[in-house]
Each structure stands twice: as structure tokens, then as C-alpha cells.
Image: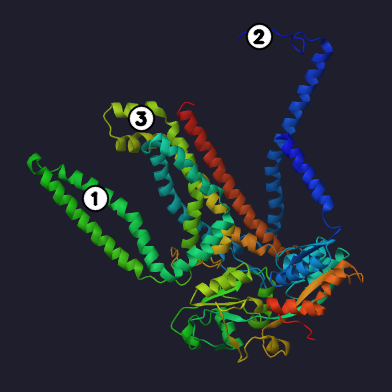
Amino acid sequence: MKPKAHSPKRSLVMNASTSRLRRLGAFLGQGFLFSVTSLSTLTVFFIFYFIAKDAFPFFKLEGFREFFTSTHWYPSGHPAEFGAMAIFFGTGLVTLGAVAVSVPLGISAAVCLSDVLPFNTRQIVKPVIEILAAIPSVAYGFFALVVFAPLLQNHGGIVLSTGAWLILTPILSLLVIVLGDLLADRFPEALRRKARWICTLTLGAAALTGMMMLGNHLSAIQIASGTNALNVSIILGIMALPTIVSVSEDALQATGRELREGSYALGATRAETIMKTVIPASLSGILAAVILGVMRAIGETMVVWMASGNASRIPEPWYNMLEPVRTLTATIAGDMGEADHVTGSARFHVLFAMAFCLLTFSFVMNLVSESIVRRSRKKLGK
Amino acid sequence: MKKAILSAAMMTAIACTAVAEQTITIDGSTTVGPIAKAFAEYFMAARPDVNITVSESGSGNGAKSLMNGVCDVANLSRPMKSTEFKAAAGNDIQPVAHVVALDGLPILVHPQNPIQDLTIDQIRKIYTGEITNWKEVGGPNLGIVVITRDTNSGTYETFEGLVMSKQKITEKAEYVGSNGAIRQRVQTTPAAIGYAGLGFVDKTVKALKVNGVYPSAATVRTGEYAIARPLFMYTNGYPKLGSAVYQFVTLYLTEDGQEMVEEIGFIPVTSY
């Protein structure tokens, strides 16, 4: 590059005073940026400090035992009871449900985006999935309450059996074909073609019968209340989807072309390359994606407040997703208004105790995911 | 970009100087909220120089806003508690009550539910979880879905005070955040029971007789209907006579005010 011919506005040679001024300017600029950055870092500490400050008086007043082991949540009762076990359980149940919905879907979608779809399609599909993250949570909540809950109540059995069919049909047909193929390989060469047909058909028939029975069983179910753990689990799963898809797709992409080409060069099929090379190589990134998705689900407030039913009680049996549950976030949001520190101090501090538990949990999760990502970067040499 | 920001800033500045000189901030109950909103609309049409904002964050939050001096008028669907009075007095704020309307709390069920009449005792037993099936009160064999307002709401406290008589609501009860949400849940759930303000009863839900009395303006005003309450607006001290706040909180005494209260579905305190 040749410098332009016209005379520079500032001389290239600095005299002492301008240089000092510049240095001062640079120092001020750096100082300003540093203070802004440290402000946002300090905010995290301040949040921790102020939540902990209001959380500890609760444990001092009421102790740990009732909070963690009782299921009686009557903060406005006389005397008040602060058993939050059912609420912790509800948070866990809903989060697990959301993970069950979003992780298989999200990882499959990420694999499809990174290794199956052509580049052009990917450019369109990925932003569309990411739009899911831009929908405000109250809109999800409204949908869950006004559309999804009545649907579950009025046609619960049909919804459940359709869902089961939709999920299990592709999985089972894949299984049937692969298993049929593997079984056929055990027959002698001459019989193999026939054996493959017979094996596949028998397995298919068995799978179909199983599906029919399951479908019949599910469609007989009556759901008393549509605002339940299942409802919010599905909605939260959809909300966590963009995070999981996006982050794990990045991780899959980051494994690079060389690894895939090496695998193909060794004679692996595309399925083998994906299952045995690409996914294991990006496993830590996928794990980080899952943790981020979990945090999205656990911290969500509006949807669970609107559509989980908010009954603070452990469902019977405990895995029954069709009963209403209550989560920590919804309790904090719902009980905050009455819980002024002048009208009853334990009632006020208990919400901070819950917030503290949530904060600690997501902090730990964040650290874990951070360390996983760091380890994966080291492994990939980036 | 810079220009856009600058012009946006200027627009805001102009907008700020152009708005009314006087602002009334109102906060509180979601039950009283519709009354305050109707009054505000009427009032602002008559007095363009006054700007009124109405928030609905629940009675407890309304009281809190008033005692912290954040709002001019606090809507409460229950009387202020002694602890709240104390806190307000501590902040040198003197809450004065204005009863703007009366409200009955109808017990709501799905329109297809054949039940017509429940006693207070039966309602209490349903909410404590003692009665769990509609057949126990003469209805179909259907598990009852108990729906209640959140503990943050004045409606909840009124219901708790008038019906529950110090007993605890069952852990199975579902909590929802507003009167509208109660109606939404009841109209879509055949086995549900819920309660909401009289203004929220429409054709999509069925209000039950309580102790043989159907909730209506007449039965609430005479006190025959058991689950009824006054609705309050609280101000800091009695507002200065003739001031905008004074005119606002006395709007319920005018004929137009009464009509508005009636239109929303509450019962005017006075009837000319």
C-alpha cells in the first residue's frame, strides 16, 4: 500500500506536549472503558450480595429444615408455613420435562442443520428457529393458557396419542429398518434377501401392534386440568429449543471439515460419520448447549406462572406430568406483592431464600458449562 | 444514526412539554382497576390538562405504592390492614378510604355443570379439599378442579376472610393471577370451580346461588348475598377540595360515575 500523496492533517512527528496529551487521552479512555466493564461485573456481585442479604434472615428466623423438607406452603396462613419442597420438586419436574422435549429435538435439528441440509436451506432454517427465542415469554404463556390448556382438557387422550405416534413412528421405523438389516446379516448369503424382508416385516408388525396398544391406552386418558406440568414442559421445551439448536449447531460446525473428510476417507457412511465422529467430537459443546437450555427453562417465570396451575404439591405418583405443579420462579413472582417486609418478615425473606437457591444453582450450572466449553476448545486446539 | 437519535431526543422533549401539567398516578387491585380506568377515561375527556395512569398490580402492591408515596390513589379490593396503616403512618402518609362501589364474589362453574346452589359450608369444604368430587354435592361423578386467585390479590383475601374462616385452602388448588384468568380457566374446564368479581360474570361461566341467594346488585346491596365486599380507593389524606384528585375520587357519587360502575358490572354505593 502506498500512502496517499496529499499532506497529512497531523504531522507524523510528535512533539513532547501533544504526545503527553495523547497519552492522557488514551489513559482516560481506557479508564472509562474499564470502569464501565467493571460496573457490569460488579452488578453480578451486588445482585448476589443483596439477594443473600435478604435470604439469610429467613434461615435465621425459620431454620433450614421446614423450608427444604416440608410440602406445606401457606405463607399467608396463621401460623405461616414455609415448606418449599413441593415447589423445588415442581421446578425440577418441569425442567426435566422441558429437557426431555428440547434435547432430542434440538440435537437432531442441530445435526440436520450442520450435516444434512444443504447450505442454502440452512441459511433460511436456522434464523427461523432462532426467531423462537425472540417471541416474548408472555406470548408463550398466553398460548399455553388459552389454546393449549383447553386442548389438553377437552381432547387430552387424542393429543397424547397423536404426540406419541408423531414421536415414536420415525424412531421405530428407523429402528425396525436398522435392526432388520443387522439380523439379516447373520443369515447365509443366499437367504439374506428374503430374510431381510421377513425380519423387517415381523419387527414392523410388532412395533405397529405396540404402537396401537400404547395409542389406545393413551387416548383413554382424561386430563382434569390442562394447566399442568406437561403443558409447561412442552412450552418450555420449545422455548429452550433455539438456544440448544443454535449452540450445538455451532459446536458441530466447529469440528471442521478435516475430521469429516477423514472419516469419509476411512470408508464411513454419513450416518457413521455423524454418530461416531462428529457428535463425539462436539460432545462438550452439545453439553454446554443443553445446560444453557436447562437454565432457560429453570429461570422462565411468565409461562409457568400462567400455565402450570401453581398448586404447591408433589403430584401423585411423583412422575405424573398431568397434575398442576408450582415452581420457584412463579412463587416469587406471584407472592411478591403481599410480601412486604413490614407485613410479615419471614414471608418476605422466604422469596429471597428461593431466589438465592435459584441464583446459586444457575451460577453453578453456568460455571460448569463455561468449563466444559473451555475444555472443548482446548481439545480442538482452538 | 446520530441524527436519528437527536431527533428522537427532541421529539421526546417536545412530547414531555406538551403533556398535561397534572398527573394522577393510580395503582392497585385488578378488581377495582376497570372502575379506575373508566373513571380515568371519562375524567381525561372532561379535563384534558390532567393525565391519569392506571396500573393494576394487586391490592397489596397498591397499598405499598401509597405508603411509599409512589401513587396518588391506591385501589384496594379489601380494607387496608392495620400493619399497612402502621407502615404508612411511619412514612408520614395518612390513608383515607373512599368506598367507590360494592362487589359480590360469585362462585363460578362451567355452564355445563348441573349444580345450581351451594352453601358456604360446601364451598369451604371444596376449597379445603374435604369434598373432591362433584357427586358429593349432587353433581356428576367428576373430580373437582379447584381454582383460586393468587395470595397477592384482594379477591383472594376477601374470599379467604368471608368463606374459609381460617381454614387452609387445599394444596391441590390451582393459583391464577387475575380475575380474567379465573374466568378463562373456568369456561374451558368442565370440572372447575372458581370465584371472581361480579363484573367478570358473563354467559361463558355460570354463577351459583350461595345459601340459596343468587349474586346480583340487589342481593349484594341488601347484604343477603353472603360473599360481598366494598371496593376502595385510598388517598393520602382527604384530597384538597376541588383538586383533580378530589374530583376523581368523588366521581362515583355522580350519576355518570354510577352508570360507569354499573356498566362494568359492579354495584354503585348510592343510587339516585
Q: Amino acid at mark 1?
A: Val
Q: Residue under circle 2?
A: A3
The Cα–Cα distance between marks 1 and 2, rounded to whole angstroms, is 70 Å
Q: Residue under circle 1?
A: A176
Rate crowding at label 2 as few (under 14), some (14 to 19) or many (20 or more) other CA atoms within 10 Å: few
The answer to whether dots 1 and 2 both sit on one chain is yes
Question: Extreme right residue here?
Answer: B241
Q: Amino acid at mark 2?
A: Pro
Mark 3 element type:
helix
The answer to whether dots 3 and 2 both sit on one chain is yes
Q: Quadrant of residue B32?
A: bottom right
Above or below, comparing residue B250 to residue A332 in the picture = below
The Cα–Cα distance between marks 1 and 3, rounded to whole angstroms, is 27 Å
Q: Position of residue A148 (x, y in %)?
A: 48, 63
Left or right position of A201 against A161? left
The answer to whether dots 1 and 3 both sit on one chain is yes
Mark 2 element type:
loop
Viewer-closest of A352 and A168: A168
Whether residue A303 is visible: yes
Q: Amino acid at mark 3?
A: Arg
- To which chain does the residue with label 2 belong? A
